Image: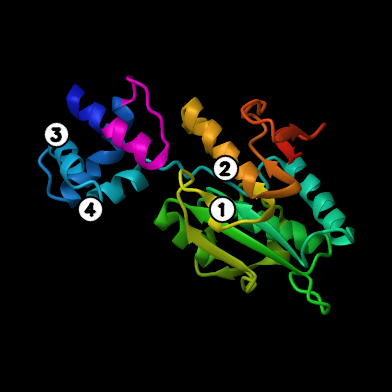
């Protein structure tokens, strides 16, 4: 069992460092995910871990605590309606003569191990959208996550048979992946795709602007105040009429007046 004072320290640290909000009954979750760190960092118990975080909040154990508590649940083409709408949105942007730039920029926030980014790339390819056209028009995708281990997996583009079977059809597998050892690797990533470690609690203006942002099934782990703050920040990095995709089951966005729901597409919102 985790001592109440140590539990409070861990909960506060996680909320301030990553936005994760844990209630008073999640001690079992902390124990199961953080116990391996005790041996790795030669700490006798959770009290010692909490003490280390109090006095050395920026050392290796602190970094590992955040990564250990990150939920990396993801799969290909999660909520297909989202990607159907994405295809139509991209085609509309390419045809729009009033678009402010010759670049379309897409941000997959909390991209985890990269299945969402791969799904975006496949959607673009199947829509006949080139990353780079002869006249200089380009599409850029940025995938970010707080978990460096997940980002390394995403950058490799290699997935196990189990992961491939979660949302990917045989037709798409054959068209976009190559067999690689015991798994499958997405065909050579394009130069207009990059990954970067990013904490959603940071101000994303340095990454801006974006035409489309995916931020799905991560805000549900934040408290209300943090969720509102993150949504306002995301709204500010969207170009006018840009689109934000949340998870379809995450509920309506009533935390910012800058976003309005898109009818018929659960979890989709457009900047006013």
Image quarter of residue 47 = top left
Q: What range is drawn magenta here?
A: 10-26
- Mark toward the start of the polypeptide (4 vs 3): 3
Q: Which mark is residue 59?
A: 4
The x and y percentages for residue 107 are: 62, 54
Residue furthest toward the bottom? 134
Q: Nearer the viewer, residue 260 or 236?
A: 236
Is the C-beta separation of discs 2 and 1 under 8 Å? yes
In front: label 4 or label 3: 4
Distance CA(mark 1)–CA(mark 3): 38 Å
Give the residue at x 34% y 37%. 14
Is 131 located above or below residue 146 in the figure? below
Q: Element under label 2? A: helix
Q: CA distance from mark 4 to mark 3?
A: 17 Å
Mark sitting earlier along the chain (4/1) = 4
- Label 1 close to label 3 by CB (< 8 Å): no
Residue drawn 63% across and 49% down?
237
Alpha-carbon span between mark 2 and mark 1? 8 Å
Q: Where does the N terminus fall, quadrant-wise?
A: top left
Q: Which residue position is annotated with label 2?
A: 233
* C-alpha span from label 4 to label 1: 27 Å
Instruction: Please give the residue where the numbered disc 3 appears in the rendered image.
Output: 47
Q: Assess whether mark 3 and mark 2 are in contact (beta carbons under 8 angstroms).
A: no
10 Å crowding of disc 4: few (<14), some (14-19), many (20+): few
Q: Earlier in the sequence, mark 1 or mark 3?
A: 3
Please tell me whether mark 4 or mark 1 is closer to you in this view.
1
* Dot label at residue 205: 1
- The number of discs equals 4
């Amino acid at each position: 069992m985790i001592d109440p004072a140590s539990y409070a320290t861990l909960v506060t640290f996680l909320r301030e460092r990553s936005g994760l909000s844990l209630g008073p009954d999640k001690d079992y979750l902390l124990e199961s995910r953080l116990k391996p760190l005790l041996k790795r960092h030669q700490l006798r118990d959770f009290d010692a871990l909490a003490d280390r975080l109090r006095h050395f909040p920026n050392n290796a154990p602190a970094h590992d605590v955040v990564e250990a508590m990150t939920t990396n649940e993801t799969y290909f083409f999660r909520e297909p309606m989202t990607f159907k709408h994405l295809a139509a949105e991209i085609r509309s942007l390419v045809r729009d003569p009033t678009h402010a730039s010759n670049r379309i920029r897409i941000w997959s926030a909390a991209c985890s191990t990269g299945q969402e980014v791969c799904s975006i790339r496949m959607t673009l390819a199947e829509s006949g959208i080139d990353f780079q056209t002869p006249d200089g028009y380009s599409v850029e995708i940025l995938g970010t996550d707080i978990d460096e281990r997940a980002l390394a997996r995403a950058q490799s583009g290699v997935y196990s048979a189990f992961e491939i079977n979660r949302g990917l059809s045989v037709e798409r597998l054959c068209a976009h992946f190559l067999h690689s050892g015991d798994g499958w690797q997405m065909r050579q990533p394009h130069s207009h795709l990059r990954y970067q470690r990013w904490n959603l609690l940071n101000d994303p203006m340095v990454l801006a602007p974006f035409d489309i942002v995916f931020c799905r099934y991560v805000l549900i782990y934040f408290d209300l105040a943090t969720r509102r703050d993150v949504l306002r920040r995301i709204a500010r990095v969207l170009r006018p009429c840009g689109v934000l995709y949340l998870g379809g089951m995450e509920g309506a966005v009533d935390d910012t007046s800058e976003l309005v729901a898109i009818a018929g597409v659960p979890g989709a919102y457009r900047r006013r």
